[in-house]
Image (cartoon, grey):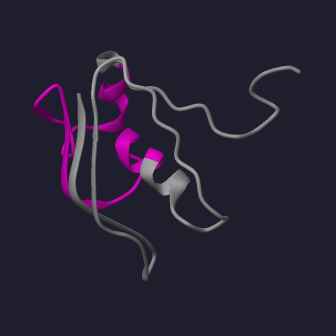
Amino acid sequence: MLTLRNVDASIGIISILRGLNVEVDAAETVALIGRNGAGKTTVLRSIMGFTDTAGEILLEGQAIHDMRPSRRPGLGIGYAPEDRRLFSA
């Protein structure tokens, strides 16, 4: 289970996420949808550890919000940015 509790994230001085709470159970499929600038990418980047965040991010009950981003893929967390250079069409 992936849990985000009261997660805040900012880019520079602009607050993007404020008090985000999400729970995703094992084998559950979730889609993040919203307009441009709604914070979808910031949620994913926060889970990967690519943003400065406040609050808690837990994977299977283990706190990962203070874990270095380089350690998170070993836990099964991955991120593929939206860029056609990464995967050929």
Relative vertical location of residue 53 with respect to residue 65 in this rendering, above or below: below
Which is more toward the observer, 68 or 4? 4
Q: Residue at x 32, y 17 (%)?
A: 74
Closer to us: 22 or 86: 22
Give the image location of residue 36, x and y in percent: 67, 65
| Residue shown at 36% from the left, 42% from the top | 47
Highlighted magenta segment, given as a residue range:
44-73
Q: Is 63 displayed left or right of 68 in the figure?
A: left
**Quadrant housing the N terminus:** top left
Query: What residue is at 77 percent from the left and 22 percent from the top?
Result: 87
The magenta stretch spans residue 19: no
User: Is residue 63 shown above or below 40?
Assistant: above
Picture coordinates of residue 39, whole percent (x, y) = 51, 62
As drawn, is 12 to the left or to the right of 70? right
- Rendering quarter of residue 48: top left
Which percent across, then down, holds residue 59?
21, 30
Q: Is residue 64 above or below residue 78?
A: below
Q: Quadrant of residue 24?
A: top left
Does residue 86 appear left or right of residue 23 in this picture? right
Estimate the x, y position of residue 23 in percent, counting from the top left. Answer: 26, 41
Which is nearer the eye, 68 or 41? 41
Relative depth, front residue between 86 and 28:
28
**Furthest residue toward bottom:** 13
* Residue 60 counted in the magenta span: yes
Residue 69: which quarter of the image?
top left
Location of residue 37 with respect to 34 vertically, above or below: below
- Image quarter in which the C terminus is found: top right
